[in-house]
Image (tube, rainbow, N blue to C red):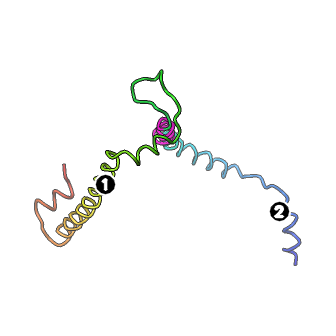
Amino acid sequence: MAIAQALPRRMGVRQRISSRTWRRTIAFYLFIAPWLIGFVLLQVVPLVIGFLTSLTNYDGLNLANIKFVGADNYARVFTDPDAVFSFGRTLRWSALNTPAWIILSFVLALIRIFGVGGFFARGTICPV
């Protein structure tokens, strides 16, 4: 019963963070800051710029003639026969290439595990 009475009083009071917890929090953010800055500058910013550029008529050369066209570029890509052909080739290549590399990797791992020694074993451990 004493616990039930103590809870409502404590819930309204904001507790102060200890100095050790505060130092650890600052250290955490300082450690992840280089990665976070790199992620934003090298991943997020180019992604946003690329998407915004795809909504214009920018051809890669003339900055003076940029005009916002919206989703017309995306609508046009599904009616373009070259783009449809390219999508088909990409899907076919992915459907054939991905399983081939997975099978090859599995076979090489089996060879490495079950016993071919010498050059192959050293070449997979130290490829330089």
Residue situated in front as seen by the camera: 97 or 80: 80
Side of 7 relative to 65 (left or right): right
Q: Is residue 2 above or below residue 102?
A: below
The residue range painted magenta reads: 40-54
- Extreme residue toward the bottom, this view: 1
Q: Identify residue for label 2.
A: 11
Q: Is residue 23 above or below residue 123?
A: above
Q: Amino acid at mark 2?
A: Met
Residue situated in front as seen by the camera: 109 or 93: 93
Q: Is residue 34 magenta?
A: no
Q: Identify residue for label 1.
A: 88
Q: Position of residue 104 (x, y in %)?
A: 20, 63
Q: Residue at x 48, y 41 (%)?
A: 47
Mark 1 or mark 2, which has the lower sequence index? 2
Q: Residue at x 46, y 45 (%)?
A: 75
Residue 69 numbered tag = none
Q: Is residue 53 magenta?
A: yes
Side of 103 relative to 24 (left or right): left
Q: Residue at x 39, y 25 (%)?
A: 61
Q: Label 2: state its secondary structure.
A: helix
Where residue 14 sits, quadrant-wise, is bottom right
**Placement of the N terminus among the 4 image quadrants:** bottom right
Badge 1 crowding class, 10 Å Cα cut-off, few under 14, some 14 to 19, many 20 or more, is few
Badge 2 crowding class, 10 Å Cα cut-off, few under 14, some 14 to 19, many 20 or more, is few
Q: Main secondary structure of the magenta part?
A: helix
Q: Position of residue 110 (x, y in %)?
A: 20, 70
Q: Position of residue 127 (x, y in %)?
A: 19, 52
Q: Amino acid at mark 1?
A: Gly
Q: Position of residue 36 (x, y in %)?
A: 52, 43
